Image: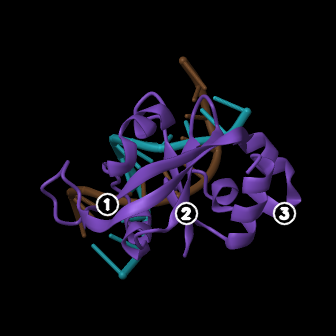
Chain colours: A purple, B brown, C cyan
Amino acid sequence: MRYWLFKSEPSTWSWDDQVAKGDGGEEWDGVRNYQARNFMREMAVGDRGFFYHSQKDREIVGIVEVCAEAHPDSTTDDARWDCVDIRAIEPLPTPVTLDQIKADEKLADMVLVKNSRLSVQPVTEADWTHICALGGL
DNA sequence: GCCAACGTTGGC
DNA sequence: GCCAACGTTGGC
C-alpha cells in the first residue's frame, strides 16, 4: 500500500464535504496539473491519503482511502485529465498543522514543504506513521 | 490582499 | 525548441 496527500481549499471542498459523501466516496476532480494527475494514475484501490486543508487552515485534518482507481475526470471533456475517487475514513483527533510539519526536522523533506503548490503528492511510510502519531492515531 | 513560485501557453 | 508572458496556487 502507498500513501498520499490530497490538498483542498476548504471553501471549495472541505473535509466535512468529504465525510458527507460517505463510503461511496467522491471524485477528486478538477486537477489540471500533470504531476498531480500522474500520481493519481499510480494509485491503487486501498491506498491511504491525508486530507489537507490549504489556505486559511493549513493543516492535515483526516485520513482518506482511494476507492476507485484513475478514470476520466467527469468535469471536463479533455481526455488528458484523470482522477481517482476517495472516501473519508476518519478524522485526525488532533489536526497536524503546516507549522508543526515545518518545525519537525523528520518531516523537512515532505513534498508539502518543498513544493507547496502540488495538490496531490506522495507521502513516505515513515512520514505517514509519524504524522499519524502527531495527530493522535 | 500581496507576492513568490511554479506551470502552461503560444509566438518566434 | 526556446523563452517571455500569463495565470494560478497557496503561504504569509
Please identify the residue farthest to the front as the structure is shown: A23
Task: Classify mark 2: residues with Cα within 10 Å, few (<14), some (14-19) or many (20+).
Answer: many
**Which residue is depicted at the point 78% across and 41% down?**
A99
Amino acid type of the residue tagged 3 in the rendering:
Lys
- Residue A89, relative to residue B3: is it above or below? below
Q: Which mark is residue A95?
A: none
Using the image, name the chain to which the residue with label 1 belongs: A
CB under 8 Å between callouts 1 and 3? Answer: no
SS assignment at label 3:
helix
Assign the N terminus of chain A to one quadrant of the image.
bottom right
Q: Nearer the viewer, residue C11 or A46?
A: A46
Mark 1 belongs to which amino acid?
Cys
Counting residues from the N terminus, which is met first, the one under dot 1 or under dot 2? Answer: 2
Q: Which residue is mark 3?
A: A106
The reply to whether residue A2 is visible in this rendering is yes
Place of residue A35 in the rendered image (x, y in percent of width and height, measured from the top left)? 44, 67
* Camera-side residue of A133 and A101: A133
Residue at which label 1 appears? A83
Q: Does residue A25 show up? A: no
Q: Do marks 1 and 2 share a chain?
A: yes
